[in-house]
Amino acid sequence: MEATGTDEVEKLKSKFMSAWHNMKYSWVLKTKTYFSRNSPVFLLGKCYHFKSDEPSEAFPDGSSCDTFNKASSGNVEEFRKDFISRIWLTYREEFPQIQGSALTTDCGWGCTLRTGQMLLAQGLMLHFLGRAWTWPDALDIENIDSESWTSHTVKKLTASFEASLTGEKEPKVLSTHHEGMLKRNCDENEMRDEVYHRKIISWFGDSLSASFGLHQLIEYGKKSGKIAGDWYGPAVVAHILRKAVEEAGDPELKGITVYVAQDCTVYNSDVVDKQCSFIGSGTGDTKAVIILVPVRLGGERTNMDYLEFVKGILSLEYCVGIIGGKPKQSYYFAGFQDDSLIYMDPHYCQSFVDVSIKDFPLESFHCPSPKKMSYKKMDPSCTIGFYCRNVQDFERVSEEITKMLQSSSKEKYPLFTFVKGHSRDCDFASSPLHEENDLFFEDEKKRLKRFSTEEFVLL
């Protein structure tokens, strides 16, 4: 009886947390993001220009596309379609209970896991779909009641609380967007791409069976003493993603691996060894690799000297983004304009979607509106990601980034380095066993302690 009462308290706390985050972040989703017409916009290596002779206006976040004249609207539409096509993974509620806890939502603590998922999702999209791919239905997202995000949220949460008090099952608020969508005549390539689009999203479903779902990531985090409800740092999430990809059971994922830099050092021979593990199994092919580099862009505050390097990284098509944010909030950085970073925010709490059913709705996995943040507000702790399709690709990438690091470092030490040889050749390198059993750096432990006392003061 006592256990049942505890579960009910946890459920009520989860509903309150969901309500708080929806009230807090639904207003953010409604606000317009302003883009300059006079500066290029970069999104994961793609460059867009909005320049025109008209005065600068707000970038449309749904219904205002017609404010741009024809000379610029083409590129604006291309940017919007490209941005919306990226996979957006946010807080969810009412998903299957996380093993070992009463939690059915990750509101308030899962944001870094979600931004890590978004970075990995972009790597998988490069691997299976290529950078040029965009979702054919991306621009239809604007029809999802963009003028009433907040009113929709309030109605949903009011119904949720009323249902919890009366003991009734929570009513579902269904989107009418799907009902009005027209069936497309797709050729074989489009059909193949749509299959992979759905498959990639399904790998991030909120259930224990999903290879990269929240439930699985939490299981891997337990090896370092983390449990559901704890705060995860960008470096910790990098190692969790590596383990998740290594353990993934889907045959489609056997051709890709993840390497995490050690002490801001990428050991080239270790990366190549990971990529060539296929050859020993008789396939003759090499694996693609996603390289994750946890770094600090300064001490307590972000060092402005690193701005140009961060912009340079986000200008590369093989960059899969940055797990970062500002203090106490994790964002997925995917681009920039001038000195502002473009990001996707995981903090909006959405309802659980069962990705195991056929033709599950895709709209909630694509963000309708980009957000911007000044680089100077960025937390210095972050993880940078790159994708390399084969060994030759990795060799080219390492050379290009090394040149960028050398040109940006000036008198300072570079943020990270590429070193020939194996990590085992260096006395100070961590052993693989140690790395797996203790995923946390000392600075991460201090940050975790600080955030554990500040993150949840509202409850």
Image (tube, rainbow, N blue to C red):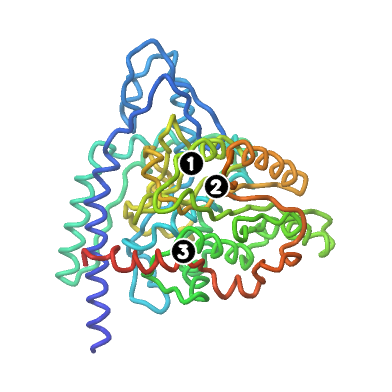
Q: Residues within 10 Å of mark 3 (few under 14, many from 20)?
A: few
Which of the 4 image quadrants contains residue 66? Answer: top left
**Which numbered disc, 3 or 1, marks the residue that appears first in the sequence?**
1
Q: Give the residue at mark 2.
A: 122
- From the top left corner, tell me how far across and down residue 265 is, in percent: 64, 55
Residue nearest the observer in this picture, 196 or 51:
51
Residue highlighted by disc 3: 443
Taking the spot 40% from the left edge, 35% from the top edge, the residue there is 340
Disc number at residue 334?
1
Helix, strand or loop status at disc 2:
helix
Q: Is residue 373 left or right of residue 247?
A: left
Secondary structure at badge 3 equals: helix
Give the answer, above or below, for where 255 lies relative to 218. Answer: above
Whether pointer 1 and pointer 2 mark residues with C-beta atoms closer than 8 Å, the reply is: yes
- Relative to 209, say whether 255 is above or below: above
Eyeballing the image, is 353 above or below 314?
A: below
